Image: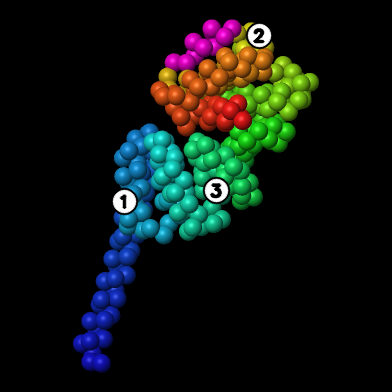
């Protein structure tokens, strides 16, 4: 091989390396842009940025995980699950991807698939509170009320805000009653007071106050103000009727929680879906 040929090969190799470095740097820039837009809830543009990052550097599991989370925000849960799966194909030890996939499988009414994913997320030290909250939900959706009520103890122990605690209690109370643990359920309900300072968990607080007898059905139903609150509130009201042996009224609320304009991926809607399945058996 002539000296000119060798030089040409070396230059081509160096050019290829530089091109790879440029693409990697551009992918990182797009990824950072996507994260910034995600933090601002500019989700459509965040998705565009993550798609660009992946097109430039498709082997980064973090890029696929970011895309997964963004798709979920856009209510594209089936696509989100696929994107989290892509992340796990690249890095099976990425605990947050197992957590994300398990979370979104619940949204997509696939609680049976969610449980092993969330258990794997725990084994890989993903966010403890998020794992516990969603694993308990998966147990609850599937009618495993003993497991759910026990898991909610961990959910409460890892809570960082009153909203976290109230959300855990709202589901735990139902799980305890349905597991036949009435004394424990009463104790859990006693932990709740009307003056608790919550924001995102207001519907959950009202659910518990309804079971206490502090709030009326009419007062709680007034909280069905948008497509997210509607299924959360409707499910709680449905359970109040169901646990008081008023199945017809319960069914009406469950159907409301699972019918648009209710957000069908909301946990209240998902839970109502499973209730209706059980009621038809």
- Which element carries disc 1, helix, strand or loop? helix
Mark 3, Cα crowd under 10 Å, few <14 / some 14-19 / many 20+, is many
**Res 170 quadrant in image:** top right
- Identify the residue at the far front of this view: 281
- Residue, disc 3: 98
Mark 2 crowd level (few <14, some 14–19, many ≥20, 10 Å Cα): few
Compute the Cα span from label 3 to label 2.
40 Å
Which residue position holds label 1?
Answer: 52
- Residue shown at 39%/36% (left/top)? 74
Q: CA distance from mark 1 to mark 3?
A: 23 Å
- Residue sitting nearer the eye, 74 or 256: 256
Q: Is residue 3 magenta?
A: no
Which residue is at a point 49% across and 29% down the rendered structure image? 266
Q: Is residue 24 above or below residue 273?
A: below
Quadrant placement of the C terminus: top right
Residue 101 locus on image (x, y percent): 51, 45
Number of the label disc, if any, that sits on residue 213: 2
> Is 221 one of the magenta-colored residues?
yes
SS at mark 3?
helix
Residue 246 in view here: yes
For discs 1 and 2, the disc positioned in front in the rendered view: 2
Which of disc 2 and disc 3 is earlier in sequence?
A: 3
Q: Report the residue at 63% width, 14% height from top.
A: 246
Place of residue 75 in the rendered image (x, y in percent of width and height, measured from the top left): 41, 35
Q: Is residue 19 above or below residue 251?
A: below
* Outermost residue toward the bottom in this view: 1
Which sits earlier in the primary sequence, circle 1 or circle 2? 1
**Quarter of the figure that contains the N terminus:** bottom left
- In-front residue for pair 198/51: 51
Nearest-to-viewer mark from 1 and 3: 3
């Amino acid at each position: 091989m002539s000296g000119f040929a060798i030089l040409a090969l070396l230059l081509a190799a160096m050019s290829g390396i530089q091109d790879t470095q440029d693409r990697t740097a551009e992918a990182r820039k797009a990824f950072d842009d996507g994260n910034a837009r995600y933090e601002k809830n500019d989700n459509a543009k965040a998705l565009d940025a993550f798609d660009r990052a992946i097109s430039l550097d498709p082997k980064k599991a973090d890029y696929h995980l970011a895309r997964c989370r963004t798709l979920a925000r856009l209510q594209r849960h089936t696509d989100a699950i696929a994107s989290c799966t892509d992340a796990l194909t690249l890095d099976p030890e990425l605990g947050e991807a197992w957590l994300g996939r398990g979370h979104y499988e619940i949204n997509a009414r696939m609680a049976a698939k969610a449980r092993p994913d969330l258990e794997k997320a725990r084994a890989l030290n993903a966010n403890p509170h998020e794992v516990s909250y969603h694993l308990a939900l998966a147990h609850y959706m599937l009618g495993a009320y003993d497991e759910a009520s026990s898991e909610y103890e961990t959910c409460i122990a890892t809570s960082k805000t009153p909203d976290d605690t109230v959300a855990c209690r709202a589901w735990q109370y139902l799980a305890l009653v349905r597991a036949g643990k009435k004394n424990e359920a009463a104790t859990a309900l006693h932990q709740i007071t009307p003056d608790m300072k919550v924001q995102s968990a207001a519907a959950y607080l009202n659910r518990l106050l309804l079971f206490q007898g502090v709030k009326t059905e009419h007062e709680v139903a007034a909280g069905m103000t948008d497509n997210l609150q509607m299924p959360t509130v409707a499910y709680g009201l449905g359970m109040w009727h169901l646990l008081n042996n008023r199945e017809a009224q319960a069914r009406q609320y469950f159907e409301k929680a699972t019918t648009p304009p209710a957000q069908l991926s909301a946990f209240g809607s998902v839970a109502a879906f499973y209730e209706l399945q059980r009621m038809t058996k």
